[in-house]
């Protein structure tokens, strides 16, 4: 008679996830590695969507199959706009969380403000690294109540969640050495600059060409922010003024009409794996404001949706398999091909090679928007 293998312990799962993140290069420092190995992710997730409208609620304790999902390198959707939270929320992919924590350059004693409470897991990881106060804010009272309860369950006594408009930050507990946004935004709130301690750092996924790559933002002595690319990422968009568009920007069009069948030019561009595809996407967006993300019927979105879109003329997509697919004017496809060539011939610069200035908008609730990409 054979004996079934014993279920892996929670501690074993945490250690395995931490080691996986190290092997992926997502964690580089012992402090971030130790945080993932000791902060129990399952205590921050009471349930998640598993496909369609199906929602799986965790038992107490959760079953092994659910723990295996929670301690895998996957994002888990915890709220949709139609449920009690009133807005979407998720537990982000651990490798993205890890890379952002490394980019924050955390050390003991640093005070941190988090915009977007999520499950509370990110705040708990930060608290484990810094041992100092972490303030997490979210506009949804449901999300905040859940995050606060999870922080208590995990014993993260130096982290607290508050209901607040992220655009305004949380001045009562400032100033902060680090500010991190865990939702997509279109620019930096001036309130954050006022709450940032001298020499501080803001890390935020800022809209660029239809996705939300993460930028590191610092402020000079004159109060002028500058940024640099950190990593490819994509987050659910924030609500309210944090997602206000500058006059020369436009939100992604979503679905665009097909002007006849999609034409395919195979092998018209280099075939690229995920990270390199996003490096190209970032560079295209820096070169031409018409670069965005869009879908059209018949397009395989899993191959990538970066495109050159010109309303009334057509749309051309460059996808991971190296093909150019387009609808409408063939000239749009030629223009996209021409934009790809300089990136390819310049040794394919990465997101981390780019820097940017910021300009303050004239809106009633202004933002500092990225402008003038350079490398």
Image (tube, helix red, strand yellow):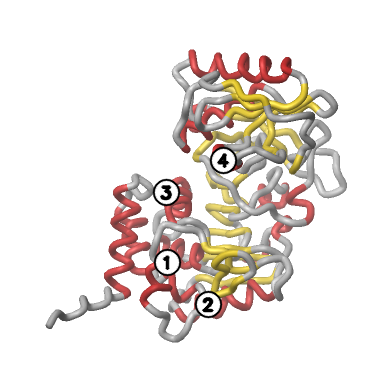
Label 4 or label 2, whichever comes before in sequence order: 2
Camera-nearest label, 1 or 4:
1
Disc ID at residue 69: 1
**Is disc 1 surrounded by few (<14), some (14 to 19) or many (20+) residues within 10 Å?**
few
Instruction: Measure how far apart labels 1 and 4 are at the Cα level.
Output: 29 Å
**Whether residue 224 is visible:** no
In this view, the residue in front, 351 or 83, is: 83
Camera-nearest label, 1 or 3:
1
**Is disc 2 surrounded by few (<14), some (14 to 19) or many (20+) residues within 10 Å?**
some
Q: Secondary structure at mark 3?
A: helix
Instruction: Measure how far apart labels 4 and 2 are at the Cα level.
Output: 31 Å
Q: Position of residue 151 (x, y in %)?
A: 50, 75
Label 1 or label 3, whichever comes before in sequence order: 1
Asked if marks 1 and 3 touch (Cβ < 8 Å), the reply is no
Instruction: Measure how far apart labels 2 and 3 are at the Cα level.
Output: 27 Å
Disc ID at residue 215: 4
Taking the spot 39% from the left edge, 65% from the top edge, the residue there is 71
On the image, numbered disc 3 is attached to which residue? 102
215, above or below 286, in the image: below
On the image, numbered disc 2 is attached to which residue? 46
Camera-nearest label, 2 or 3:
2
Label 4 or label 3, whichever comes before in sequence order: 3
**Is disc 4 surrounded by few (<14), some (14 to 19) or many (20+) residues within 10 Å?**
many
**Whether residue 317 is visible:** yes
Asked if marks 1 and 2 touch (Cβ < 8 Å), the reply is no
**Which image quadrant: the N terminus?**
bottom left
Q: Secondary structure at mark 1?
A: helix
**Is disc 3 surrounded by few (<14), some (14 to 19) or many (20+) residues within 10 Å?**
some
Asked if marks 2 and 3 touch (Cβ < 8 Å), the reply is no
Label 2 or label 3, whichever comes before in sequence order: 2
Asked if marks 4 and 2 touch (Cβ < 8 Å), the reply is no
């Amino acid at each position: 008679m054979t004996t079934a293998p014993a279920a892996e312990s929670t501690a074993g799962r945490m250690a395995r996830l931490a080691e996986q993140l190290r092997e992926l290069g997502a964690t580089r420092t012992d402090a971030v590695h130790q945080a993932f190995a000791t902060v129990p992710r399952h205590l921050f997730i009471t349930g998640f969507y598993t496909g369609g409208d199906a929602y799986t609620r965790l038992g107490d304790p959760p079953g092994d199959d659910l723990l295996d999902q929670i301690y895998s390198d996957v994002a888990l959707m915890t709220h949709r706009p139609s449920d009690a939270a009133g807005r979407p929320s998720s537990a982000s992919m651990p490798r993205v969380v890890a890379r952002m924590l490394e980019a924050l350059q955390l050390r003991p004693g640093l005070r941190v403000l988090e915009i977007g409470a999520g499950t509370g897991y990110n705040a708990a990881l930060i608290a484990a690294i810094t041992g100092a106060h972490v303030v997490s804010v979210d506009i949804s009272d449901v999300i905040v109540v859940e995050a606060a309860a999870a922080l208590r369950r995990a014993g993260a006594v130096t982290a607290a969640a508050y209901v607040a408009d992220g655009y305004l930050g949380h001045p009562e507990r400032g100033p902060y050495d680090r500010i991190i946004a865990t939702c997509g935004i279109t620019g930096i709130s001036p309130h954050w600059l006022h709450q940032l301690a001298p020499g501080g750092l803001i890390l935020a996924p800022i809209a660029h060409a239809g996705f939300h790559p993460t930028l590191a933002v610092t402020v000079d002595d004159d109060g002028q922010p500058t940024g640099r690319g950190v990593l490819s990422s994509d987050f659910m968009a924030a609500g309210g003024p944090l997602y206000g568009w500058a006059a020369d920007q436009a939100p992604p069009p979503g679905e665009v009409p097909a002007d006849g069948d999609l034409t395919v030019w195979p092998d018209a561009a280099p075939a690229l794996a995920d990270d390199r595809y996003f490096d190209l996407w970032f560079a295209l967006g820096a070169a031409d404001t018409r670069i965005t993300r869009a879908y059209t019927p018949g397009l395989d979105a899993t191959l990538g949706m970066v495109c050159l879109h010109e309303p009334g003329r057509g749309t051309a997509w460059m996808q991971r398999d190296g093909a150019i697919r387009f609808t409408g004017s063939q000239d749009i496809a030629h223009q996209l091909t021409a934009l790809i060539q300089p990136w390819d011939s310049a040794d394919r610069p990465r997101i981390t090679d780019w820097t940017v200035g910021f300009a303050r908008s004239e809106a009633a609730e202004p933002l500092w928007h990225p402008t003038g990409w350079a490398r």
